[in-house]
């Protein structure tokens, strides 16, 4: 199980409080994302499409996303919504199949189920959204950012690592459909902002979260440890 970055940072602070020097503590932000296979994609044609990728759990904020989709239509700015991912019946937070069936009948929403090639999702979408109540370092946002998609996410630890306001994303409070609607509509109506945040998201992945960079940093870390042990 992947620990949330906020928990990892808490552990790091606890170690420092116990006397471990900060110079001896290294945080590795996950395994990274393959920026060679996931390249920037051109925007698809309209309608403006928002995509969610993740397990269909209450904690992922899917209900807030459905409510925001309804609000956008009520405001006269209908958006197409793609939802990729499966339910997880063994998880107590899983959304019941009956509720998913009810939502799938709403106009403008398409449930894609499990997707093998994630590029297929982001090639159809203008905007990536993840309205979670809590996250680790969300791979879905990393992959969307690698494809140069602007992000809309909740202002919670984990999401904030990659969804940075004004750089790659618009952030909203969790469980706040009106704020989520505002952010989605703002991006839907501003192609320049989508392009700027999408470009920023790609740069952020390249500089901080690419699998090549993280792999090189891990190798360098082990080399330093070996040198320390051998007294070089």
Image (tube, grey):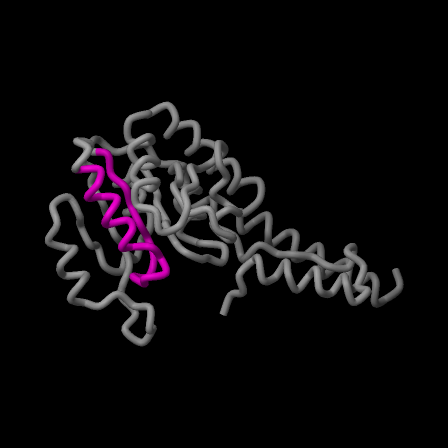
Q: Nearer the viewer, residue 114 or 77?
A: 77
User: What residue is shown at x 34% (from left), y 40% (from top)?
Assistant: 179
User: What residue is shown at x 50% (from left), y 46% (from top)?
Assistant: 160
Q: Nearer the viewer, residue 63 or 23?
A: 63
Name the spot of residue 142 as percent of width and height, x first: 45, 48
Q: Is residue 75 magenta?
A: no
Q: Magenta stretch?
A: 48-73
Name the spot of residue 11 as percent of width and height, x first: 66, 64
Q: Nearer the viewer, residue 154 or 51?
A: 154
- Is 6 situated left or right of 220 in this image? left
Above or below for 184 versus 141: above
- Which quarter of the picture shows residue 12? bottom right
Q: Nearer the viewer, residue 130 or 195?
A: 130
- Is 197 situated left or right of 4 in this image? left
User: What residue is shown at x 37% (from left), y 23% (from top)?
Assistant: 192
User: What residue is shown at x 41% (from left), y 37% (from top)?
Assistant: 148
Name the spot of residue 112 as percent of width and height, x first: 21, 55
């Amino acid at each position: 199980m992947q620990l949330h970055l906020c928990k990892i940072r808490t552990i790091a602070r606890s170690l420092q409080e116990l006397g471990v020097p900060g110079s001896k503590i290294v945080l590795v932000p996950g395994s990274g994302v393959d920026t060679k296979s996931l390249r920037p994609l051109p925007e698809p044609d309209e309608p403006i499409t928002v995509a969610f990728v993740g397990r269909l759990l209450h904690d992922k904020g899917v209900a807030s996303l459905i409510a925001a989709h309804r609000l956008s239509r009520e405001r006269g700015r209908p958006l197409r919504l793609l939802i990729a991912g499966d339910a997880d019946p063994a998880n107590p937070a899983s959304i019941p199949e009956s509720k998913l069936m009810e939502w799938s009948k709403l106009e403008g929403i398409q449930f894609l189920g499990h997707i093998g090639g994630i590029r297929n999702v982001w090639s159809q979408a203008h905007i990536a959204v993840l309205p979670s109540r809590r996250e680790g370092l969300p791979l879905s946002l990393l992959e969307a950012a690698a494809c140069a998609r602007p992000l809309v996410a909740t202002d919670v630890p984990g999401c904030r690592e990659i969804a940075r306001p004004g750089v790659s994303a618009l952030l909203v409070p969790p469980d706040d459909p009106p704020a989520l609607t505002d952010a989605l509509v703002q991006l839907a109506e501003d192609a320049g902002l989508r392009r700027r945040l999408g470009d920023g998201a790609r740069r952020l992945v390249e500089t901080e979260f690419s699998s090549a960079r993280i792999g090189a940093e891990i190798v360098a870390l082990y080399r330093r440890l070996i040198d320390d042990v051998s007294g070089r």
